[in-house]
Amino acid sequence: MINKGKAILSGLLLLAGLQQGQAQLMKAKEIYNKADSLRGQLTPLRTCYDVLYYHLDVKVDIDNKFISGSNEFKFKAVDRFNKLQFDLFDNLSVDKVVYKGKNLEFSREYNAVFVNFPEYIEKGKEDSFTVYYSGNPIQATRAPWDGGFDWKKDSNGKPWVATACQGLGASVWWPNKDHQSDEPEGMMISVAVPNGLMNVSNGRLVKTEKLKDGYTKYHWQVKNPINNYNVALNIGDYAHFKETYAGEKGKLDLDYYVLKENAGKIDFLKKNANETLKAFEHWFGPYPFYEDGYKLVETSHLGMEHQSAIAYGNKFQNGYLGRDGSGTGWGMKWDFIVVHESGHEWFGNNITAKDLADMWIHESFTNYSEALFIDYFYGKKASQAYVNGNRTAIQNNSPLQGPYGVNKEGSGDMYNKGGVLHNMIRTMLEDDDKWRDLLRGMNKQFYHQTVDYNDILSYMNEHTGIDLTKVFDQYVRHKGIPTLEIKETPKAGTFLIRWISEVDNFKMPVHIFDKDGKAIRIQATSRWTTHSFEGLTKESIKPDTFNYYIGVSIQ
């Protein structure tokens, strides 16, 4: 997702509308905590079944901002059970839940739905049920940073509608097991829209069906695992352009859906998409979803990493709406939304955090993918300048990692500070070929998988050969940065060096420049250790603070 501070709503910001009063505020807090736990925790009612496949079939009544339809859940029983939980925001009606042709009993608590089955479903059995639902979904006011349906019109007055729901949750508009740890192995997305418009969703268009009521239904098949928040619909008066890209796994289909009024700008998107894929297949390995193709779909909101159907709203210009947040100028040489959201195809869509608390995995690597795009086309020096320039937006106000089990992400620093972290690790490694192999290997090892903090840490420790445990603890789980303390000793060129950090027994390699300007890597810890640099004094000793995001105290 795009970095725009902490603007993602968690659904229950509805509390802001409650009137003041201590009793009401206490109740509001209780609702917030309970609803977040129901959404964020993996209870036995959620872990008892593994979703294999969804068929989402929905009709969109644009005039009334109303949706209706069904979702079939195909699942495998992980444990023996006769009750389960799925999720749907409580402003939408669950009209019925059907199993083997019969309606099931169900109850609701906030945005969770509990279904009772007439008999136990035995462990290992594959089965299915279908949820029928309807209602007026939450309307996004600042998509993609809040979430819901974005009901807009193009300049010709034709409807232009999209969904975006990261953080808030896919259950804001369709019923599913709304937890990032469980991805279906594939799905069908069928969306009926008024004649004269088209719907673009994830995967490949396999069928267009004319209905009798003035609607056309578009059927999109997704053959790869997909996270719920990536499932999207995009409705508009689109022009379609198609080409192929000669990628690492062979021919990759590239599709572009832009408003007909912007058809003349398609070459801009094609150039950016081709350059992005070239750079990222170099750094990260093959595009992870060849079977589903790669699409850019124009939206009225700025953008989102919807798998194989990236939402694009950067108005056909370089930079981030024509700006460069790094202040270096390097960010003005490419379209930020194409690069950033495409980076998420590897980090976020291919490798997905199990819990929203670890959203930093998505955003830190994707933020750094911007720098690697620059590296590929303009060189390492430009790449590092871009990372360094992005520091100005870091606030160090809270950890990158959020709390587990309550559907909450961490600090917005997960973008720029996360990118800085990866650039530091690359600098510590001192081997760019190994760094590239590491990134490609990560996408291979965790191909189409969900991961957590420990998975990433263990992988980085093993493949860098550096114990980064304390480094990740400090930069991901704490809000501050360490300070390198340097004391000159009476012996010429000799210094005592240690780290001061929030993390006990902190250790991290760092580079110090010698008298000839060569960067020498040393291992510093929280204890004083002695290091010698011929010809240096406390006035001339200089740590690499360009590539290391640290404090420095020299005495």
Image (spheres, rainbow, N blue to C red):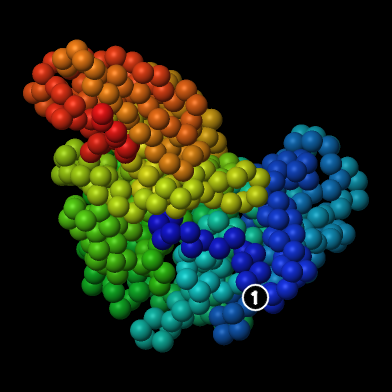
Residue at image point 24% right, 69% down: 265
**Label 1 secondary element:** helix
The percent coordinates of residue 64 (x first, y second) are 61, 84
Q: Is residue 245 left or right of residue 405?
A: left
The percent coordinates of residue 170 (x first, y second) are 60, 59
Of the residues shown, which amino acid type is indicated by label 1?
A: Gly
* Quarter of the figure with residue 160: bottom left
Local crowd size for mark 1, using a 10 Å CA cut-off: few (<14), some (14–19), many (≥20): few
Residue at image point 53% right, 72% down: 140
- Of 239 and 92, nearer the camera is 92
- Of 41 and 328, nearer the camera is 328
Q: Residue furthest right?
A: 118
Q: Is residue 450 left or right of residue 497?
A: right
- Residue 272 at least partly seen: no
Residue at image point 29% right, 19% down: 496
Residue 242 drawn above or below residue 227? below
The percent coordinates of residue 252 (x first, y second) are 34, 47
> The N terminus lies in which quarter of the figure?
bottom left
Residue 102 drawn above or below residue 527? below
- Of 327 and 195, nearer the camera is 327
Residue 336 drawn above or below residue 209? above
Which residue is under mark 1? Answer: 17
- Residue 107 at least partly seen: yes
Residue at image point 53% right, 57% down: 166
> The C terminus lies in which quarter of the figure?
top left
Q: Is residue 401 left or right of residue 21?
A: left
Q: Residue furthest left?
A: 516
The percent coordinates of residue 336 (x first, y second) are 29, 57
Residue 50 drawn above or below residue 156? above
Q: Residue furthest front?
A: 490
- Of 424 and 182, nearer the camera is 424
